[in-house]
Image (cartoon, helix red, strand yellow):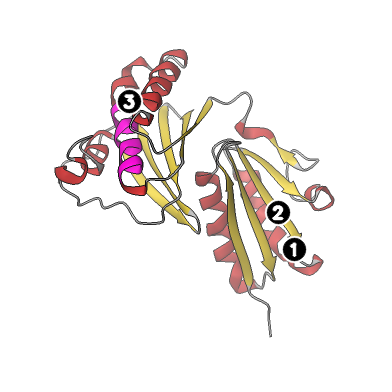
Amino acid sequence: MSVPLEWAFRRDFRAGSTRIVLAGGCPPDAEPLLAAVLRDGDVDAPLDLVIDLRDLPAVAVASAGTVIVPWAAARAGGPVLTVEPPTHAAGLLPAGPGRDPKGAPGRRRAHLNLPAHPDSPAAARRLVADRCRAWGRPGMMERAVIVTSELVSNAVEHAGTELDVTLVEQAGAVRVSVRDRAADRPDPAANGNLLAERGRGIPIVAALASDWGFVTVGDGKTTWAVVGGDLPADG
């Protein structure tokens, strides 16, 4: 009987890193699950993503490698990727030894750890405005600032937990991600009263972003939005 794959996300908010801890086994039928976990980790991690294989037996590491190797090679960017322990990393990451630096320091990324406080949306707005100007994206700045303010306000109001904001410039667009520690799902059908006192909520994000979505993990969720390119079509 095959041993199922076990996984967990461990987030260090202040360092801006996500660790994916894999354990158990990695039978062939677990490969789609592992691929989804890796994709979610890439969205969840602000600056650094660590794949921790220390609890996987050698045969499972080899099986997991059939998923990790092509995924890592195909990444167009994202957080800096590290595999632990280093003895497993050389054969899994294209840049080796143990580290794929596609995400930083040269990439345009910014990260801000914030408390669940009424001042946090303003701090996030300042970060986004500053980075959009520095990255030569003034035409996206107003929309990006509004979208970020709504996402952070939503997290402060409804999650009520420590959160962080990650801003990435890529492919001619600005991507904003807000991570909190509450696993409840954002409601895209919520009306304008979602944030009656502090904002307009998810509907304004959907209206101003060219794409948006969320990823739930064991200890919370990441809600993200892309500003740039065409806006969503009406209807």
Q: Cα distance, mark 3 to mark 2?
A: 35 Å
Residue lying at 51% horizontally and 46% vertically, measured from the top left: 44
Residue 199: x and y, percent?
Answer: 22, 35
**What is the total number of numbered labels drawn onto the structure image?**
3
In the figure, residue 25 lies in which quadrant? bottom right
Return the residue at label 3. 145
Helix, strand or loop at mark 1: strand
Q: Is residue 85 left or right of residue 215?
A: right
Q: Residues within 10 Å of mark 3 (few under 14, many from 20)?
A: many
Return the residue at label 2. 52
Disc nearer the start of the sequence (3/2): 2
**Residues rendered magenta in the picture:** 144-157
Q: Which three-letter amino acid code belongs to the residue tagged 2?
A: Asp
Q: Residues within 10 Å of mark 2 (few under 14, many from 20)?
A: many
Disc nearer the start of the sequence (1/3): 1
Q: Is the residue under label 1 in contact with that under label 2 (CB below 8 Å)?
A: yes
Residue 104: x and y, percent?
Answer: 62, 29
Q: Which three-letter amino acid code belongs to the residue tagged 1?
A: Asp
Q: Which three-letter amino acid code belongs to the residue tagged 3?
A: Val
Return the residue at label 1. 55
Residue lying at 74% horizontally and 65% vertically, measured from the top left: 56
Residue lying at 42% horizontally and 16% vertically, measured from the top left: 130
